Image (cartoon, grey):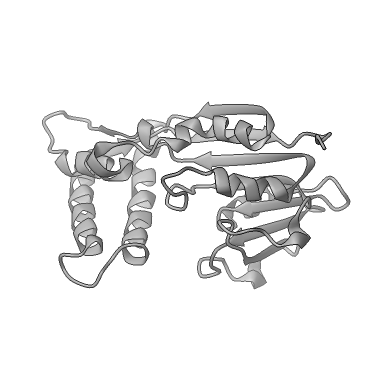
Amino acid sequence: MISTASPINHADFSRSQWLIDISPDLPSAQLDGFDVSEEQYPCKTWLPSHISLSQLDITNEIPPHLEGVYDLVHVQLFLCVVQKDGPAAILKELYKLLKPGGYLQWVEYDPISFEVVSPDRSLKQTANEKHVLTIRGREGKATEWPSKLSSYLEDTGLVQVISKSYPLPSEMYAPFMQCHLFAAEEVSLKAMKNDSSEAQGPMFRELLAEVHKECQRGVTMAESPVVVIGRKPVHLLV
């Protein structure tokens, strides 16, 4: 997150990597990172002095001392956090964090854009196809809110909203899929039932193993992340 005061303040909800990336360009800014858990934060000893990482659950009301503090709030990859009713409740809290004139930037996977790609159509790709349907939700119904994220920002009261998709280049298919499989396995261990071999977690990991086998032969998933930016009005209506 960033503030226009001295020093500038930025807030980040992406496990700190975004803050680390931008920190050399903003040596005088205060960069604050938040996550629901501190488990995956890097060792704070090795971070630049102007990065601060702490625990915050953005699905609950933010503490009053954070209201109106930031010039820029960055949110990334909340697909597993947002519930079926959409991101409106989370956006309400993110809006509170911003100063008048501050910006919200949200980077998200768009499940509608997921597709299976292959160097050879004769290769088996059933596991990847099943995995895409799993990502989109029950009975293949897509998780649609990322493709409508710009409308959600506007409904929250943000203005000058822009949205752009960034198709994954083919040379990034393999690195993306490796990261995706690691993340999917973590979700299966922490967010799914694992109390028996027939539970959701173990069954999902079996599917991931088959997806990996297909990926070793070149079959993979392609997607187009969406980036949406909006601004809190400078002059707020009373």
- Furthest residue toward right: 6
Does 171 appear above or below 8? above
Does 77 appear above or below 43? above
Quarter of image, res 205: bottom left
Left or right relative to 168: residue 208: left
Left or right relative to 92: residue 135: left
Q: Which of the pair 237/226 is nearer the observer?
A: 237
Residue 192 can be seen, yes or no: yes
Quarter of image, res 197: bottom left
The residue shown at (71%, 39%) is 103
Does 57 appear above or below 221? below
Quarter of image, res 201: bottom left
In percent of width and height, residue 40 lies at: 51, 66
The residue shown at (77%, 34%) is 233
Q: Which of the pair 225/67 is nearer the observer?
A: 67
The residue shown at (47%, 49%) is 82
Residue 24 can be seen, yes or no: no
In percent of width and height, residue 108 lies at: 49, 41
Q: Which of the pair 226/56 is nearer the observer?
A: 56
Left or right relative to 3: residue 38: left
How many badges with numbers are in the image? 0
Quarter of the figure with the C terminus: top right
In percent of width and height, residue 41 lies at: 56, 66
Left or right relative to 92: residue 132: left
In percent of width and height, residue 217 lies at: 19, 42
The residue shown at (64%, 67%) is 54
